[in-house]
């Protein structure tokens, strides 16, 4: 009788994180991927603990789960790609796709892969956050329709630093959150005559930001794969007029923006 093996290796671990704050997401999530089985451990990581082989290469990958002294040499590292979908049953975060490359190299297999989750349009906001709500539309069949699966970034106008970002849902609704805008601005007044007394002037801080919209292609999918957009960004611009700038301020929400966009090659 063959011995019962209770120990198994994990092929990878996913760590869901909130895109706005960087904090781990501990709420219940659904992770699906054809050919893989996941187990969530006590640390909140989704570990790949099972393979349902569909090809010869995937049968070789399944052997990695039972190899403890050294991983098998086949299949080659990161030669297999699995399409994953993460979803939040509570609807606080938008569903997203990603591609998991297996097997991981020995140096990386114990390092969790951070998977950013983006807030849904109805997600609650903290009092000290800045936010922009926008409805993204494109022309479909001569009529405005939702632009879903699009990334909305808030770029600081002075230097293009990314202050926050969000994604549009199936209705084209996007919520982009910026965390960390200072509440108070301490500045030294200067009138150029050298008579400054060095006293500080206290005022509220506001940051001018410009909007940028990108997808992975001219025909974006929902749910989107943010990594694919980062790798091959496809820009969108307003059909009429320039992209509006917004003023970000702690505790302020900019709402009511509707952007009718068209693809651009620039």
Image (cartoon, rainbow, N blue to C red):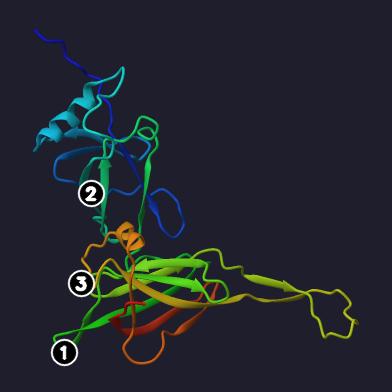
Label 1 crowding class (10 Å Cα cut-off): few <14, some 14-19, many 20+? few
Q: Position of residue 32 (x, y in %)?
A: 19, 47
Q: Secondary structure at mark 1?
A: loop
Residue 36 occupies quadrant: top left
Q: Residue most toward the bottom?
A: 240
Residue at left 23%, top 47%?
Answer: 31
Q: Nearer the viewer, residue 249 or 145?
A: 145
Q: Position of residue 105 (x, y in %)?
A: 34, 33
Is residue 93 visible to the viewer in this orientation of the structure?
no
Q: Is residue 223 above or below residue 173?
A: above
Q: Secondary structure at mark 3?
A: loop
Residue at left 23%, top 55%?
Answer: 89
Q: Earlier in the sequence, mark 1 or mark 3?
A: 1
| Residue of label 3 | 219
Q: Position of residue 199 (x, y in %)?
A: 84, 74
Residue 58 occupies quadrant: top left
User: How far apart, in angstroms, are the residues tagged by discs 2 and 3?
Assistant: 26 Å
User: How far apart, in angstroms, are the residues tagged by discs 2 and 1?
Assistant: 37 Å
Which numbered tag is attached to residue 30? Answer: 2
Q: Earlier in the sequence, mark 2 or mark 1?
A: 2
Q: Nearer the viewer, mark 2 or mark 3?
A: 3
Q: Is residue 124 above or below residue 81?
A: below
Quadrant for the C terminus in the image? bottom left
| Residue of label 1 | 142
User: How far apart, in angstroms, are the residues tagged by discs 1 and 3?
Assistant: 16 Å
Label 3 crowding class (10 Å Cα cut-off): few <14, some 14-19, many 20+? few
């Amino acid at each position: 009788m063959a011995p019962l093996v209770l120990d198994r290796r994990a092929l990878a671990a996913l760590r869901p994180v909130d895109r706005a704050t960087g904090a781990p997401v501990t709420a219940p999530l659904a992770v699906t991927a054809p050919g893989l089985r996941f187990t969530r451990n006590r640390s909140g990581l989704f570990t790949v603990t099972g393979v349902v082989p569909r090809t010869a290469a995937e049968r070789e990958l399944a052997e990695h789960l039972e190899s403890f002294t050294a991983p098998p040499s086949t299949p080659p590292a990161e030669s297999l790609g699995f399409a994953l979908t993460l979803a939040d049953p509570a609807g606080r975060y938008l569903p997203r796709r990603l591609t998991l490359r297996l097997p991981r190299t020995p140096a990386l297999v114990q390092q969790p892969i951070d998977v950013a989750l983006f807030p849904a349009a109805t997600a609650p906001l903290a009092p000290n956050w800045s936010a922009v709500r926008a409805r993204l539309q494109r022309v479909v069949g001569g009529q405005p329709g939702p632009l879903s699966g699009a990334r909305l970034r808030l770029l600081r106008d002075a230097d293009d630093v990314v202050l926050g970002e969000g994604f549009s849902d199936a209705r084209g609704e996007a919520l982009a959150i910026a965390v960390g805008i200072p509440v108070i601005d301490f500045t030294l007044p200067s009138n150029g005559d050298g008579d400054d007394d060095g006293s500080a002037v206290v005022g509220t801080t506001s940051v001018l930001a410009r909007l940028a919209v990108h997808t992975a292609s001219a025909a974006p999918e929902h749910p989107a794969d943010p990594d694919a957009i980062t790798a091959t960004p496809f820009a969108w611009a307003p059909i009429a007029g320039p992209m509006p700038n917004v003023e970000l301020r702690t505790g302020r929400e900019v709402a009511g923006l509707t952007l009718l966009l068209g693809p651009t090659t620039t």
